[in-house]
Amino acid sequence: MTEQTAPPPAAPIQESQPQAVIDATPQQGSSKGSEEEALGSLKEMQESVGQISELAKEEENLVKEFFGFLLKILKSFSNTLEISVSSLPEDYNGQVSKAYLYLTGQLVLVYKNGEVRILNLADQENHGILVEITGEIMTKLKTIVSSHKAKIEKRVKFLMSVTKELQRAAKVFSEE
């Protein structure tokens, strides 16, 4: 027979927390260092605020130029570009059924419930959306320009062959 011994009873678990040590002795020179750090942080913040202002002005100018150039390039081709809903920021996915960009910078959103909303992408609060859809705008721009170029090339090729035939016919008449 083997005797089984019960394990010794577990000792009660005691939670121990470190005692807080309070040192009321002021450290030498730390106050001056903290003031210098605070002033340094304030100076950095002021520089950043100035840079934000400059960058915002530059962004505003670039957006105006973007839509100005887009208008000049596309006005002879189209007044609007259809933007795929998947290129919109995630906030709009599932809610918007169609999106159209007018060349002047308005983004028309047609919601699934029939509501229509117009966002002016030239407004600063909408610049993020503009950045999100710029890739698609450039792809569509490239497609439109390439398509127009192909149409012109086809017409030129046709007119060139017709002109050569007319030239031959005219040559016969000029020999008489």
Image (cartoon, rainbow, N blue to C red):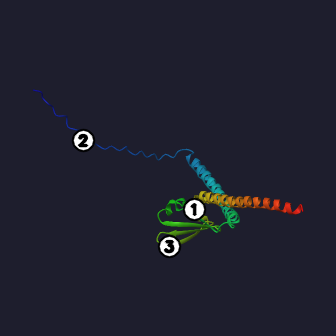
Quarter where residue 8 is shown:
top left
What x and y, as percent, mark residue 156?
74, 60
Under mark 2, the amino acid is Pro
Q: Which residue is mark 2?
A: 12
Which dot, 1 or 3, sits closer to the camera?
A: 3
What x and y, as percent, mark residue 160?
76, 59
Of label 1 and label 3, which has the lower sequence position? 3
What x and y, as percent, mark residue 91?
50, 62
Which dot, 3 or 2, sits closer to the camera?
A: 3
Q: Which residue is mark 1?
A: 129
Which mark, by number, is residue 65?
none
Of label 2 and label 1, which has the lower sequence position? 2
Q: Indicate left or right for 78 with 110 as reference.
A: right
How many residues crowd around disc 3 within 10 Å: few (fewer than 14), some, or many (20 or more)?
few
Under mark 3, the amino acid is Glu
How many residues crowd around disc 1 within 10 Å: few (fewer than 14), some, or many (20 or more)?
some
Of label 3 and label 2, which has the lower sequence position? 2
Which mark, by number, is residue 115?
3
